[in-house]
Image: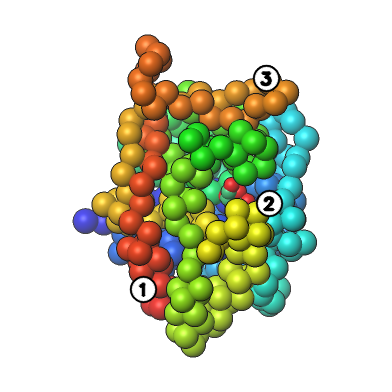
Amino acid sequence: MSPRPIIIDTDPGQDDAIGILLALASPEELNVLGIVTVAGNVPLELTSKNARMLCELANKPETKVFAGCSRPLIRPLVTAEHVHGKTGLDGVNLPLPKFSLQKEHGVDWTIETLMNAKDDSVTICCFAPLTNIALAITKKPEILPKINKIVLMGGGFFEGGNITPTAEFNFFVDPHAAKIVLSCGRPIVMLPLDVTHKALMQRKWLYNLRDLGTPIGDAAYGMLSYYERFDKEKYGSNGGPLHDPTVIAYLIQPDLFEGRHVNVEVEINSEFTIGMSVVDWWNVTDRTPNAIFINQINADGFFQLILERLSRL
Ligand code: BDR
Ligand code: CA
């Protein structure tokens, strides 16, 4: 089978970084058409720089990187330096990127790429606030039939929120975009906090990364060691959750995950619950299911997959 064409939409971020590396290390399964950045964990200028540094780290400087939106659709930007550090990739010192950003705006490139694709062919992988893809859908709804599925890290239900008591960061930063995406009518797979909080990085796994003895292993060890401190302190857990790579792992090895096809809506009005994903897990409404909400993961298999793939780079 030929590799699945994907677009990665991202705001790196240490966990985004591992998602990008995992995708670039898996050319048999995934054909990364391009990476589109967005403002989220840190402002757009930094996420765009970080994405290029990661492609160079992976020895794939030919990867096309486009800058997308510098702010959410309606609300002011909220960033997460308190989690990811000032650069977004604190914990590692990567050389400045040698290659430039593509000139085209990331949203226009996404539209153009989808319009030139066959129906039902391209998978959109979202690691960040959903601003870019929501804007692309709004500007050009004709792209929708071209999308095979949207696989996104975002939301949470039984697990509560990580930026407010009820909202996960990506949905909170741009709830209006999340609402547009969830109501777009194409197949959606959601990797929410309910699953990523079951994928905690054990110390021994971080040491395995370091013991790869490669620039990738060292960089991953450095940035993840920095990044895990925040959630470990917050939740009192044994390790930090590795959110965004679940999107790519789901595409490479879906049998690592389990979930349920349910209706998911996003709150956009309430002062206290804005950005909350409201999941009809028990099917108590007559709202139509619009997403597969993943809530189980084989964490050992997930970490093994990342380790094995990163060792290939
Ligand atoms: C999400 O928010 C960001 O901080 C992470 O990169 C991830 O995409 C987790 O809530
Ligand atoms: Ca992210």
Residue under the image location 74 percent in, 47 percent down: 79
Disc assigned to residue 269: 3
Measured Cα–Cα span from mark 3 to mark 1? 44 Å
What kind of residue is marked 1? Glu
* Quadrant in which residue 269 is drawn: top right
Q: Position of residue 219 (x, y in %)?
A: 58, 76
Q: Are marks 3 and 2 in contact (CB under 8 Å)?
A: no
- Residue 141 against residue 193 in the figure, above or below: above
Eye-nearest disc, 3 or 2: 3
Residue under label 2 = 41
State left or right for residue 154 relative to residue 2.
Answer: right
Q: Crowdedness of circle 3 by 10 Å Cα count: few (<14), some, many (20+)?
A: few
* Ligand 1 is within 8 Å of the C-beta of the residue at disc 2: yes
Disc assigned to residue 49: none
Q: Secondary structure beneath disc 2?
A: loop
State left or right for residue 10 relative to residue 282.
Answer: right
Measured Cα–Cα span from mark 1 to mark 2? 27 Å
Q: Position of residue 267 (x, y in %)?
A: 60, 23
Q: Secondary structure beneath disc 1?
A: helix
What kind of residue is marked 2? Asn
Residue furthest left in the image: 1
Q: Crowdedness of circle 1 by 10 Å Cα count: few (<14), some, many (20+)?
A: some
Q: Position of residue 178 (x, y in %)?
A: 56, 31
Residue under the image location 51 percent in, 44 percent down: 193
Marks counted in the figure total: 3
Please indicate, yes or no, whether residue 282 appears anywhere in the rendered image. Answer: yes
77 or 287, which lies in front? Answer: 287
* Ligand 1 is within 8 Å of the C-beta of the residue at disc 3: no
- Residue 23 against residue 107 in the figure, above or below: below
Residue under the image location 43 percent in, 61 percent down: 23
Q: Position of residue 249 (x, y in %)?
A: 38, 56
Please indicate, yes or no, whether residue 33 appears anywhere in the rendered image. Answer: no
